[in-house]
Image (cartoon, grey):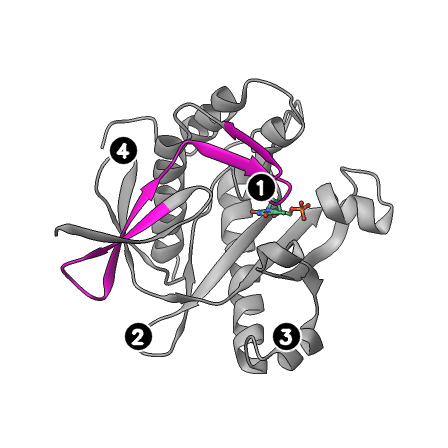
Amino acid sequence: MEKQEQLYEGKAKKVFRTSDPEVYWVSYKDDATAFNGEKKGTIVGKGELNNRISAIFFSLLKERGVDNHFVKLLSATEQLVRRVEIIPLEVVIRNIAAGSLAKRLGLEEGTVLPQPVVEFYYKDDALGDPLINDSHIQVLGIADDSTVQTMERIGLRVNEILQAFLRERKVILVDFKLEFGRAADGSVLLADEISPDTCRFWDEETREKLDKDRFRRDLGDVEQAYQEMLRRIGGDFDV
Ligand code: TMP
């Protein structure tokens, strides 16, 4: 497989075409942003850590029957994925109140939610990725009802799988964000990344944050936290 022209550069990744029109080449960067790009920085080694962590989660999900775009790891910072057209929605699933939910609903961070909360955010930098509901999604023509239901169903299944996997590794899955795409055959496919950039992970015992909140909130030891997550999920080996 050969890397061809760059199609897209996002905040954390670059995407390239390959000789196979159905396969894209993703390169993970060390760049970190928060608050819709207002805060910028570099987390040394993040590209490699997120590439490896995401590959492990997507492989686990595939093993457990949740199909997704991941094809294979290419190098420390690169992986191959199936081509999809990303649906401009961020699907957030929450088990514990934190971040914007804690703020919006006036809940203390750490409050256990009686059931998972599912939210949709419209991926639009100019609007600052607003929280939107089903009828907004319909009115804007972003996705039809059955697509929204599919994303919610897959999101909740991913939550069950990752929660159980992480619990065994003494990590609490507080919340996370997923993105989906439309594959060539029209199906809705889980895509993007699952990493400490896109999830909140807390150590079960100490409640120490092992995710991007260390960068967002200037808590220090960001790289060490990502490394610890890779170690916990069993990926601290060479590929
Ligand atoms: P929030 O509490 O800031 O809304 O974040 C909820 C989850 O979504 C958290 O695990 C971090 C993740 N997330 C992203 O992956 N990208 C984003 O742009 C934002 C705002 C959150």
Which residue corresponds to the image point at 54% horizontal and 61% vertical from the top-left?
A: 155
Q: Which residues are magenta?
A: 14-41
Label 2 CB, ligand 1: below 8 Å? no
Q: Earlier in the sequence, mark 1 or mark 3?
A: 1
Residue position marked by numbered label 3 in the rendering: 137
* Mark 1 surroundings within 10 Å by alpha-carbon count, few (fewer than 14), some (14 through 19), many (20 or more): few
Above or below, 211 relative to 8: above
Residue type at tag 3:
Ile
The C terminus, quarter of image: top left
- Residue 104 is left or right of residue 58, and the answer is right
Q: Earlier in the sequence, mark 1 or mark 4?
A: 1
Q: Nearer the viewer, residue 172 or 103?
A: 103
Which residue corresponds to the image point at 34% horizontal and 59% vertical from the top-left?
A: 69
- Helix, strand or loop under label 4: loop
* Mark 4 surroundings within 10 Å by alpha-carbon count, few (fewer than 14), some (14 through 19), many (20 or more): some
Q: CA distance from mark 2 to mark 4?
A: 28 Å
The image quadrant of residue 209 is: top right
Mark 1 vs 3: CB contact within 8 A: no
Based on the picture, tell me whether residue 214 belongs to the magenta stretch: no
